[in-house]
């Protein structure tokens, strides 16, 4: 199907709303799993902005950058979840307030 | 008229994200997050990017969320963890971050409403994306492959240390016959 005629402003505002939600979550959650989820939301909103811009100018570049963001998100979440397991093992909690010192 | 579809999908994505990040139970939050990602996939489809929509569902809602599910199952967070999360959710904790990000959001929305941008509506097929990906962007593909390799090695390394630490502690907790002889 053809893409709908949607003003680019509106899509970018949705991306901004999602990004702000992720940013607020990143700041006020202390559980490391929720921090990773907030990062995913923020990366996803950046991808939405790229795809919307690509659709507005009828170029494939937006989707190419979206795929690169996907690769970054996958690499980040695999290392991040490995670190979650380490944090749980070492501190017996997922609360980031207990893992502030660099030396553990 | 068809614009309504976009606004519905956008509202679903926003509410699901807000609910996901304010839950105390990680598994429930994950379900909301998956709903949010599916709604964003609908937006991609409406924007004329079916390939990105398929990738969003396959990689985000499929692979990455399954990783989260596995880790949450491995950690086996109990009731007390949920209770602590609930206590941490009182307004004094979230008012200031919410205020700060709302200020940024308002600035961004004001900027976006002032600029009179183009409209979406072009259909970009997977073929065009592929031609672009393996044409001008082939270097970026190589760099992404290196990044994924680094992520793989990093995750393996962190996970391996996790397991070897575990066996170390077990050997300390239950001394082997030889060490028991030495102790005696």
Image (cartoon, helix red, strand yellow):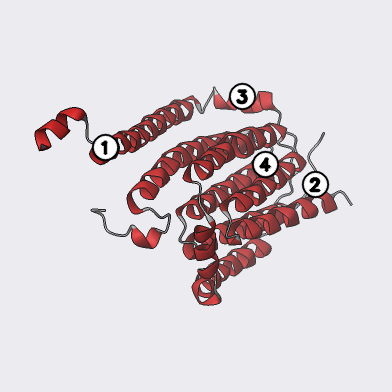
Other residues around mark 1 within 10 Å, as few (<14) / some (14–19) / many (≥20)? few
Looking at the rendered structure, the secondary structure element under dot 1 is loop
Mark in front: 3 vs 4: 3
Residue nearer the viewer, A91 or B133: A91
- Label 1 and label 2: CA atoms lie apart by 68 Å
The correct choice, above or below, for A3 with respect to A94 in the image is above
Mark in front: 4 vs 1: 1
Specify which label sits upstream in the sequence, 1 or 3: 3
Residue nearer the viewer, B124 or B78: B78
Q: Which residue is mark 4?
A: A57
Q: Are marks 2 and 4 on the same chain?
A: yes
Which of the numbered marks, if any, corresponds to residue B130?
A: 3
Looking at the rendered structure, the secondary structure element under dot 2 is loop
Specify which label sits upstream in the sequence, 2 or 4: 2
Asked if residue B116 can be seen in this view, the reply is: no
Q: Which residue is mark 1?
A: B174
Looking at the rendered structure, the secondary structure element under dot 3 is helix
| Number of dots carrying numbers | 4
Percent position of residue B95, x then y: 54, 74
CB atoms of marks 3 and 2 within 8 Å = no
- Label 3 and label 2: CA atoms lie apart by 24 Å
Chain letter for the residue marked with disc 2 in the picture: A
Q: Which residue is mark 2?
A: A5
- Label 3 and label 4: CA atoms lie apart by 17 Å
Mark in front: 1 vs 2: 1
Q: Are marks 1 and 2 on the same chain?
A: no
Kindly identify the residue that appears in the image at 59 percent across and 64 percent down: B108
């Amino acid at each position: 199907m053809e893409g709908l005629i949607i003003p680019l402003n509106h899509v970018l505002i949705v991306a901004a709303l999602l990004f702000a939600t992720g940013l607020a979550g990143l700041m006020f959650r202390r559980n490391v799993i929720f921090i990773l989820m907030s990062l995913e939301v923020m990366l996803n909103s950046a991808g939405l902005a790229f795809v919307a811009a690509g659709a507005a100018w009828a170029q494939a570049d937006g989707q190419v950058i979206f795929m690169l963001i996907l690769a970054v998100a996958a690499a980040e979440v695999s290392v991040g979840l490995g670190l979650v397991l380490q944090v749980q093992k070492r501190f017996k909690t997922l609360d980031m307030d207990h893992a502030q010192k660099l030396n553990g | 008229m068809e614009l309504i579809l976009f606004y519905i999908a956008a509202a679903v994505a926003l509410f699901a994200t807000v609910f996901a990040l304010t839950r105390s139970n990680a598994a429930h939050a994950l379900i909301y997050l998956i709903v949010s990602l599916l709604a964003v996939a609908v937006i991609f489809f409406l924007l004329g990017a079916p390939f990105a929509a398929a990738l969003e569902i396959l990689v985000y809602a499929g692979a990455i969320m399954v990783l989260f599910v596995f880790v949450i199952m491995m950690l086996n967070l109990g009731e007390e963890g949920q209770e602590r999360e609930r206590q941490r959710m009182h307004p004094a904790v979230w008012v200031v971050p919410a205020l700060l990000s709302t200020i940024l959001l308002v600035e961004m929305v004001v900027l976006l409403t002032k600029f009179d941008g183009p409209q979406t509506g072009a259909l970009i097929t997977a073929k065009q994306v592929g031609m672009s990906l393996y044409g001008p962007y082939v270097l970026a593909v190589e760099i992404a492959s290196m990044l994924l390799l680094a992520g793989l090695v990093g995750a393996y390394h962190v996970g391996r240390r996790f397991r070897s630490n575990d066996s170390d502690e077990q050997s300390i907790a239950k001394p082997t016959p030889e060490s028991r002889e030495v102790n005696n």
